[in-house]
Image (cartoon, rainbow, N blue to C red):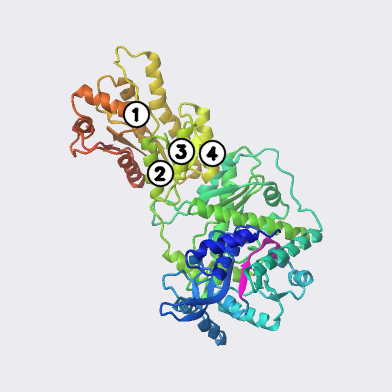
Amino acid sequence: MKSAWRDEHAAEAVDRYAAEGVSEDLALRVYTTRLLGSEPRLVLHGGGNTSVKSRAVDVTGEKLDVLYVKGSGWDMGTIEPAGLPAVQLQPLLGLSMLDGLSDEDMVNLQRRNLLDSKAPNPSVETLLHAWVPHTYIDHTHANAGLVLTDQPKGEEICREVFGDRLAIVPYIMPGFDLAKKAKEVADAHPDAEGLVLLKHGLFTFGDTALQAYERMIEFVTLAEQRIETGRKRTFASAAPPEAMLDVVDIAPVVRGLLANRPEASSDPQRFILDHRISEEILAYVGGKKLSSYSQIGTVTPDHAIRTKPKPVVLPTPTTDDLQAWALDAKTAVDTYRADYTAYFGRHNPRHAGAKQMLDTSPRVVLVPGIGLFASGRDAASAGAAADLAETTVEVITAVEEMDRFESITEAELFDIEYWSLEQAKLAGASEKVLARHVVVVTGGAGAIGRATAVAFRDAGAEVALLDLHGEKLDKAELELDSCGFGCDVTDDASVRAAFDGVVRQFGGIDIVVSNAGAARQGAMAEVSDELLRESFELNFFAHQRIAREAVRIMRLQSTGGCLLFNVSKQAVNPGANFGPYGLPKAATLGLVRQYAIEHGREGIRSNGINADRIRSGVLTNEMVTSRSKARGVTESDYMEGNLLGREVKASDVGDAFVALALAQATTGAILTVDGGNIAAALR
């Protein structure tokens, strides 16, 4: 591993933060913390922490000894000075005289000694940083270090590789007891340059930020070199199957199997999926001993919080019979859920039955020949779990090529997964109303499509925009921070490819807003068959094409779903010379209700919106001008010609689509969004 320290960058950091009143030692602490956090082989998703002992002035002007230590919730790769809250050092040092301290009392004491009461909670390993007498301290979960310690002779190998330069601490759960043991070991080895926490990670010390950082890089490099010389065998993998299902067929099934179905809720608790595949992952999931090494535990304890202690292994999809594979996969997931319930039952009594069982759904799914899936409440958390799963693959592969993978005990894994501090975070967490849902919006680059995407995104959903390839889609994707997929809704292959893309990205689809369309005008006695057929293709058959594809995926998930259609007031209140547009829209209104009739028992709802006079690609500014002139009114009078006397916006349509998506007991309904147009009221 190479050092990323650059003198000029360090100097720039000092100058930049000095303008904010930040001291040089804290500025350099931020700089090297970012270097560590930017290297995924060292730190992933909140893992690891850093500190520096310094001096600070409180509000009274008194100079105090403080410990700047990483705060909870901050990512080392993007940390700022605010992410290293200052804690008074002297009170922390006095705590070392205690025999024990609960996690809750430890957190309260640390918070009581913050210089800024609004600062984040200091790291759970704050006491370790305080009690070890070095200025700069770095802590990572370096992959190479885990490879050395996660095997039967791990301690022996570490002594061989690091000698007396790193002192060794046995595995103890993070908190007061670990800090106490680390202090004892550090005190017994005053010349040590750091610590090896077995099956956990590495600490390095330094008088300067540069020294602590480059010691970490040096020791990780020594571990990497030892791994390369210690490999005894090639990781054994079974031959890949000749015939297999595709990931786009499997993913919705997996997503449906992972969904939790609380009895009190009519709507399943879904997950977003993140699929990963590489040669190393395929070798791992295709390994002859997969059912053994994958079920031992996590490679470092805190992974259990995001990934659970074990993944589920699904059968190899060597058949083209998706339903048969799905039944076998369901058996595997059902067995996992039962085993997880039993695991909770074994260990909760040690905590006087005080723990509340988390959901039983696995967070990592291994599928031979396909790769791995990770799940989360949103795309970000699914991605984090997938990153940790990939790290697990890398570490276990290297260990198995050297010896045999070992983790901490099942009881220790339970204590981490059900750690009271993490349980408190979960209890206080809240989700938006459409979190865990995947929404597809066609015509996503247009005015109504964009407004609808914003409304669903603000409600917590993951949103995919479908529209024709081009600058408009690229711009919408960038501005809305959403995934865009080029799609011609009048072409079967294009629609299938776009939906496959969404499934690859998120694992499935829950809500589809079939919005794409365009106005076609002409008197019916004069309009050409070509124009009429073209309008039907875009304004009716495209809706059918989108709905059919959505239902196919929703059925694979077996978690229901919601079809939403942008119809039009033209369906019930046609205007002169608008037949080529109104007729296919009238057919689409019938389509909405037909899907409601045929798929209600599967939990798939179908509803539509009849909007009127929305500035968009259908009702352009030029068309507003021509229509208002034709009626002899001003443009504002034309746009506000409704019972409410206000112009209806694209955002009003987006909000209405969200309302229909949330209406669990509503299907076959048409909602008007027109400010009040009695002539367009349904009879």
Rendering coords of residue 474 (x, y %)? 48, 37
Left or right of 595? Residue 163 is right
Q: CA distance from mark 3 to mark 2?
A: 35 Å
Q: In the rendered image, which residue does mark 2 sit on?
A: 603
Q: Amino acid at mark 2?
A: Gly
Element on which disc 3 rests? helix
Q: CA distance from mark 1 to mark 4?
A: 27 Å
Q: CA distance from mark 3 to mark 4?
A: 19 Å
Rendering coords of residue 201 (x, y %)? 65, 68
Q: Amino acid at mark 1?
A: Val
2 or 1: mark nearer the eye: 1
User: Which residue sits at x=67%, y=76%?
Assistant: 169
Left or right of 619? Residue 431 is right
Left or right of 144? Residue 139 is left
Q: Which residues are magenta?
A: 135-145
Q: In the rendered image, which residue does mark 4 sit on?
A: 501
Count neighbours of disc 1 (C-alpha within 10 A) and say few if under 14, some if 14 to 19, many if 20 or more. Answer: some
Q: Which of the two labelled residues, at mark 3 and mark 2, occupies the earlier sequence position?
A: 3
* Quadrant of the image occupied by residue 48: bottom right
Q: In the rendered image, which residue does mark 3 sit on?
A: 475
* Quadrant of the image occupied by residue 10: bottom right
Regarding residue 292, the answer to whether it shows in the image is no
User: Which residue sits at x=43%, y=73%?
Assistant: 116
Q: Which of the two labelled residues, at mark 3 and mark 4, occupies the earlier sequence position?
A: 3
Q: Amino acid at mark 3?
A: Lys
Specify whether residue 144 is painted magenta.
Answer: yes
Count neighbours of disc 4 (C-alpha within 10 A) and say few if under 14, some if 14 to 19, many if 20 or more. Answer: some
3 or 1: mark nearer the eye: 3
3 or 4: mark nearer the eye: 3
